[in-house]
Image: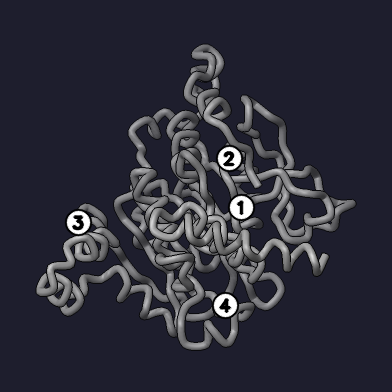
């Protein structure tokens, strides 16, 4: 889980001008006009941990209260200023494309019934200024391969990568925090959070030194190390902003176990040529790739939902005596 509070985020916005200017001068000056307009969503995974629910439906379409996981991710991207969404899909993922497509039948029915609020809600799923693109990952060959599949649609621009399994909730959208770091330093940025050492086998773990509060200059990254081998207690979460040079390193990777290309390996390779930063985001992360994390997200967001929060909280309170008895 990341930190919390506006004060930490404000630090990034008020970095000492002298130090910030010096470090920006270390970056490619041609990057001054680069903006992050594109986001890549790798959604070709099989979702085996949620079988049988995901046998014929993408795990990214699992609902948390009244929105699917992928919609939370897209909304986060939109709130970070992203206007082009690139979905790297696989077999049985057509539901994602349908979700972000216009539904003439539903809209006509809602309009005929005078359901204006629902009609507005359906139309807001994909705002008119946002474009969606789809590319197939023919084989499940790792996260790095999924990102590489999007190269032709990225067109040599900086871009974000969002893993919808990680539902990140904060006062400021987490991807917006990373984009702000990118805009300041013009370097690739990886989202990280503080983890328990014993959990290191579930994360990519970074090594580096802190530059400004919560901004770390990477010197290394290891995929799922044993606790005794973890170089720090900072684990990578499913939010990235990359310079397009990451594709050069993805193409050069040699396949690892199962023929997969790992994004972590490409980042490690990228470090030999250019600066890469990590940002310790503030907010709360729910690992919706696990059943427990998914349930936690559902409870937390239901307690914040304007339609059901009061009644749901009352229901949970009725459960407390039974839980206490079991304990």
Question: Circles 1 and 2: CB distance less than 8 Å?
Answer: yes
CA gap between label 2 and label 4 equals 26 Å
CA gap between label 3 and label 2 equals 29 Å
- Residue beneath disc 1: 237
CA gap between label 3 and label 4 equals 30 Å
Tag shown at residue 47: 4
Which quadrant would residue 92 be assigned to in this image? Answer: bottom left
Tag shown at residue 281: 2
Q: Earlier in the sequence, mark 3 or mark 1?
A: 3
Tag shown at residue 128: 3
- The answer to whether 152 is drawn above or below residue 77 in the figure is below
What residue do we see at 31% from left, 55% from top? 84
Q: Secondary structure at mark 1?
A: strand
What residue do we see at 54% from left, 75% from top? 45
Q: Secondary structure at mark 3?
A: loop
Q: Earlier in the sequence, mark 3 or mark 4?
A: 4
Position of 75 with respect to 216 (left or right) is left
Position of 94 with respect to 190 (left or right) is left
The residue most toward the right is: 228
Please tell me how crowded label 1 is: few (under 14), some (14-19), or many (20+) other residues with Cα within 10 Å.
many
- The answer to whether 167 is drawn above or below residue 181 in the figure is below
């Amino acid at each position: 889980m990341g930190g919390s509070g506006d004060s930490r985020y404000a630090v990034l916005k008020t970095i000492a001008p002298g130090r910030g200017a010096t470090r920006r001068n270390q970056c490619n000056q041609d990057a001054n006009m680069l903006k992050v307009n594109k986001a890549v969503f790798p959604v070709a995974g099989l979702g085996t941990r949620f079988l049988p629910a995901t046998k014929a439906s993408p795990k990214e379409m699992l609902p948390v209260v009244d929105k699917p996981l992928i919609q939370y991710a897209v909304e986060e991207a939109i709130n970070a200023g992203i206007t082009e969404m690139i979905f790297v899909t696989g077999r049985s993922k057509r539901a994602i494309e349908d979700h972000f497509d216009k539904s003439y039948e539903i809209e006509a029915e809602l309009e005929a019934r005078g359901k204006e609020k629902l009609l507005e809600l359906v139309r807001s799923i994909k705002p008119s200024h946002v474009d969606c693109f789809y590319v197939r990952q023919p084989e499940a060959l790792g996260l790095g391969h999924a990102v590489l599949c999007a190269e032709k649609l990225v067109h040599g621009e900086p871009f974000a990568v969002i893993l919808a399994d990680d539902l990140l909730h904060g006062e400021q959208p987490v991807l917006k925090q990373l984009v702000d770091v990118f805009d300041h330093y013009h370097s690739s940025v990886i989202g990280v959070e503080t983890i328990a050492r014993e959990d290191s086998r579930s994360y990519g773990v970074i090594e580096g030194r802190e530059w400004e509060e919560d901004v770390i200059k990477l010197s290394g990254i290891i995929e799922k190390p044993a606790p005794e081998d973890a170089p720090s207690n900072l684990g990578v979460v499913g939010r990235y902003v990359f310079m397009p040079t990451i594709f050069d390193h993805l193409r050069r990777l040699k396949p690892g176990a199962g023929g997969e290309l790992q994004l972590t390996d490409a980042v490690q390779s990228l470090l030999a040529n250019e600066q890469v930063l990590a940002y310790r985001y503030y907010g709360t992360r729910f690992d919706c790739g696990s059943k427990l994390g998914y349930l936690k997200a559902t409870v937390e967001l239901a307690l914040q939902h304007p339609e059901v929060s009061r009644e749901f909280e009352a229901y949970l309170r009725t459960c407390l005596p039974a839980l206490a008895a079991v304990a």
